[in-house]
């Protein structure tokens, strides 16, 4: 029987090989680029907001399996969330992968956080945390709308 670590590895590999929402959104309301100079990961995130709700999220880029899987899973959980909920998920995810203090999440967001759980193993590999959070930082930059590309240094 497959243990949890193997299951998480399979989820990461699946999203790395077959990323969801890997496409450019035509006419996005928000977009930003991110770059991890340490390993060369590059990502462009595209968001479409309908009021305060993220109605569509997608990405393009190239990078390691963790970076690609993180962007894929991120776009899945962000769709249908408010901007505030998206930021709350990022804060919680970031705390979990960096060993920071986690605040409680509401029930619907806790369920979404479970979908991101396979990526939390990067906490044991500090250099990989940047791979797992690059797309999230790009989303933050897109929402700020200042056009400054994100770097993970």
Image (spheres, rainbow, N blue to C red):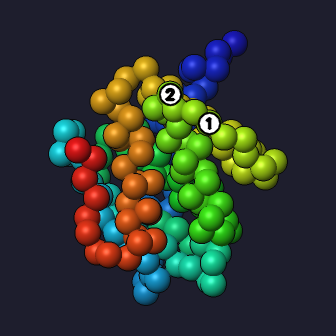
Residue on which disc 1 sits = 102
Residue 77, percent from left and from top: 62, 55
Q: Residue at x 46, y 83 (%)?
A: 29
Left or right of 22 in this view: 104? right
Answer few, some or many: residues within 10 Å of disc 1's Cα (few below 14, many 20 plus, some between 14 and 19): few
- Considering the numbered disc 2 on the image, is that residue within a helix, a strand or a loop? loop
Q: In the rendered image, which quarter contains the N terminus?
A: top right
Residue 121, percent from left and from top: 50, 26
Q: Is residue 148 above or below residue 75?
A: below
Residue on which disc 2 sits = 99
Residue 40, percent from left and from top: 20, 45
- Considering the numbered disc 1 on the image, is that residue within a helix, a strand or a loop? loop
Left or right of 152 in this view: 98? right
Task: Write down the quadrant of residue 123 in the picture.
Answer: top left
Q: Residue at x 50, y 28 (%)?
A: 99
What's the distance in space between the residues labelled 1 and 2, CA to CA? Answer: 8 Å
Q: In the rendered image, which quarter contains the C terminus?
A: top left
């Amino acid at each position: 029987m497959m243990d949890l670590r193997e299951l998480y590895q399979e989820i990461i590999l699946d999203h790395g090989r077959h990323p969801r929402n890997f496409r450019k959104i035509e006419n996005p309301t928000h977009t930003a680029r991110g770059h991890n100079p340490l390993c060369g990961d590059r990502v462009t995130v595209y968001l479409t907001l309908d009021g305060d709700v993220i109605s569509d999220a997608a990405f393009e880029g190239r990078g390691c399996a963790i970076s690609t899987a993180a962007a894929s899973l991120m776009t899945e959980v962000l769709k249908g969330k408010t901007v505030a909920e998206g930021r709350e998920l990022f804060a919680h995810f970031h705390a979990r992968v960096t060993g920071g203090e986690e605040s409680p999440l509401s029930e619907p967001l806790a369920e979404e956080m479970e979908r991101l759980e396979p990526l939390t193993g990067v906490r044991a590999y500090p250099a990989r945390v940047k791979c797992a959070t690059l797309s999230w930082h790009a989303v933050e930059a897109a929402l700020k709308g200042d056009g400054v590309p994100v770097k993970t240094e």
